[in-house]
Image (cartoon, grey):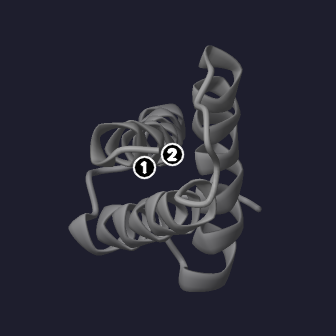
Amino acid sequence: MDNWEVAAIAGMAFLGGLIYAVYFWLASNEKFNGRKFGMSVISALFAAAVFAVGYSFVDKLDAKDLLLALGSGVGITAAGSKVLGGSAPVGS
């Protein structure tokens, strides 16, 4: 796998995490809190790093792999937000 494919898989995981953070910030109707949003960005970066390392050992990258990374980026950021106090849904 070349560097562009590793960057693509990491970017999709990061994008999934950012989508989660922005969605739940907008849904919360709260004033923007940079600290909470920053913690969600850190969780998204962690998701990107996990996928970059994991997929660096794979020979071929398909569209389904990119969709898996996007969805998993959402999940990793959701879990990380619960632990780190990021942009998790209000009341949870």
| Residue 55 visible (yes or no) | yes
Q: Which residue is mark 2?
A: 13
Q: Which mark is residue 10?
A: 1
Viewer-side residue, 74 vs 69: 69
Residue farthest bottom in this picture: 84
- Residue 52 x %, y %: 48, 59
Give the percent coordinates (x, y) of residue 65: 66, 30
Residue drawn at (53%, 33%) of the image: 27
The residue nearer to you, when weighing 56 against 79, is: 56
Label 1: few (<14), some or many (≥20) within 10 Å?
many
Q: Is residue 82 above or below residue 13?
A: below
Query: Which three-letter amino acid code belongs to the residue tagged 2?
Result: Ala
**Residue 90 is at least partly visible in this image:** no
Q: How many residues crowd mark 2 within 10 Å: few (<14), some (14–19), many (20+)? A: many
Q: Quadrant of residue 8?
A: top left
* Residue 88 position (above or below residue 30): below
Q: Is residue 58 above or below residue 57?
A: above
Dividing the picture into quarters, in which one does residue 11 lie? top left
Which picture quadrant has residue 81?
Answer: bottom right
The one nearer the camera, 71 or 8, is: 8
Q: Residue furthest right?
A: 92
* Place of residue 85 in the rendered image (x, y in percent of width and height, measured from the top left): 54, 78
Instruction: Please state which amino acid type lies under the numbered disc 1.
Output: Ala
Q: Residue at x 56, y 57 (%)?
A: 51
Q: How many marks?
A: 2
- Which of the numbered marks, if any, corresponds to residue 92? none
Q: Are marks 2 and 1 in contact (CB under 8 Å)?
A: yes
How far apart are labels 2 and 1 at the CA level? 5 Å
* In front of the other: 55 or 50: 55
